[in-house]
Image (cartoon, rainbow, N blue to C red):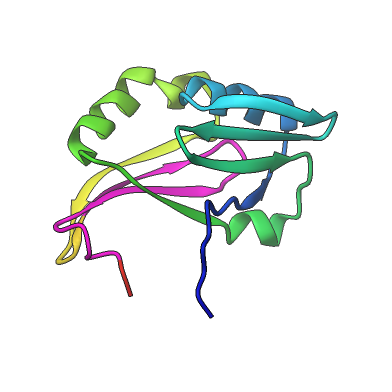
Amino acid sequence: MEHKAISIRPFIGAKDFELSRRFYRDLGFQESVLSYNMSYFNTRELGFYLQDAYVRDWIDNTMVFMEVEDVTRFWNELVALDLSTKYQDVRLTPVRTYDWGRECFLHDPSGILWHFGEFYNSTAGEV
């Protein structure tokens, strides 16, 4: 089967929907409100749906990987946003180096773990 996909858009949940909406706007995503309980957040061609739904086991096991061009620059911009002071449960983990590349981590207000990484070469992330 030949995929001619345009994008992939995961659905993620929120413990406190309004708080998470503010968080993702502060993180630099653009919001499009779809209904009273769902918004689409995007940056360039990348995006995800945030829904007013919370199932602890689901949220605690949700991870999203976003490839960035320069993880060090991205990390510095994350730190400058001071999100962990503005949002009680937000946690940042500094850049780590692996054999495939480098990444830093961010837990959103609900506990979703975001990985922001860069690969050593453009095909390293391909399986």
Q: Is residue 50 visible?
A: yes
Span of residues in magenta: 102-125
At a point 47% along the width and 26% down the height, the residue shown is 27
Place of residue 35 in the rendered image (x, y in percent of width and height, measured from the top left): 83, 31
Q: Is residue 14 visible?
A: no
In the rendered structure, the answer to whether residue 46 lies left or right of residue 105 reads right
Viewport quadrant of the N terminus: bottom right
Is residue 122 on the magenta stretch? yes
At a point 67% along the width and 26% down the height, the residue shown is 32
At a point 66% along the width and 35% down the height, the residue shown is 40
Is residue 36 on the magenta stretch? no
At a point 29% along the width and 49% down the height, the residue shown is 117
Viewport quadrant of the C terminus: bottom left
Place of residue 16 in the rendered image (x, y in percent of width and height, measured from the top left): 73, 33
Place of residue 79 in the rendered image (x, y in percent of width and height, measured from the top left): 31, 25
In the rendered structure, the answer to whether residue 85 lies left or right of residue 37 reads left
Q: Nearer the viewer, residue 7 or 39?
A: 7
Q: Nearer the viewer, residue 46 or 56?
A: 46
Q: Is residue 61 above or below residue 81?
A: below
